[in-house]
Amino acid sequence: MFWVVNWLDNYWIPGPYNPEREKFSSDIKYRFSSGISKHEEYHINSFKNKSIEIINNILEGIKDSSNYLQEDYPCPEDIKNSEGNKIVNDFREDFIEQYNDWVEANKQQEETLADKNARPFYEAIKQNIRNWAERQNWYNPDDPLCSDIFKD
């Protein structure tokens, strides 16, 4: 139990990407799916929100740069047939470039925020372990081994 709480206190609660946390070997012995899920959920929501923002910006740019004259393209189908592939390819390239630039510029910040998002779940796991231990007949709050494990 000591090692599980130690991993929580020194690895998972501060966050795997926190540069100030205690260094552990790469052999992670204890993983907690609820905390990892919350960390990854942050990335999914962040990706979704940033993708929507980039798409809206690109679409505004396409709309603003549309110089298609009605006499040249009397029907929207004519624009699609003439310029559609170019518009789609430009859109795809712009999206990939802007997203990759954003990821590169914000990687550490995003990992820090994802760790922060998961922290309450790791703290709850620690509290659940503490609650369980306190109900065991071997638990003694005056014993340094027990009190050191659950120091706040």
Image (cartoon, rainbow, N blue to C red):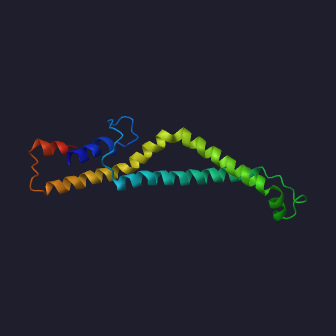
What residue is at 9 percent from the left and 49 percent from the top? 140
74 is higher (above) or lower (below) than 55: below
Quadrant housing the C terminus? top left
x, y percent for residue 79: 82, 59
x, y percent for residue 5: 24, 46
Q: Is residue 93 left or right of residue 80?
A: left
134 is higher (above) or lower (below) than 103: below
150 is higher (above) or lower (below) than 134: above
Q: Is residue 108 left or right of residue 125?
A: right
What residue is at 54 percent from the left and 51 percent from the top? 47
Q: Is residue 52 left or right of residue 4?
A: right
What residue is at 26 percent from the left and 51 percent from the top? 126
x, y percent for residue 22: 32, 36
Q: Residue lying farthest right?
A: 71
Residue 68 seen anywhere in this rendered image of the structure: yes
Residue 63 seen anywhere in this rendered image of the structure: no
What residue is at 55 percent from the left and 43 percent from the top? 103
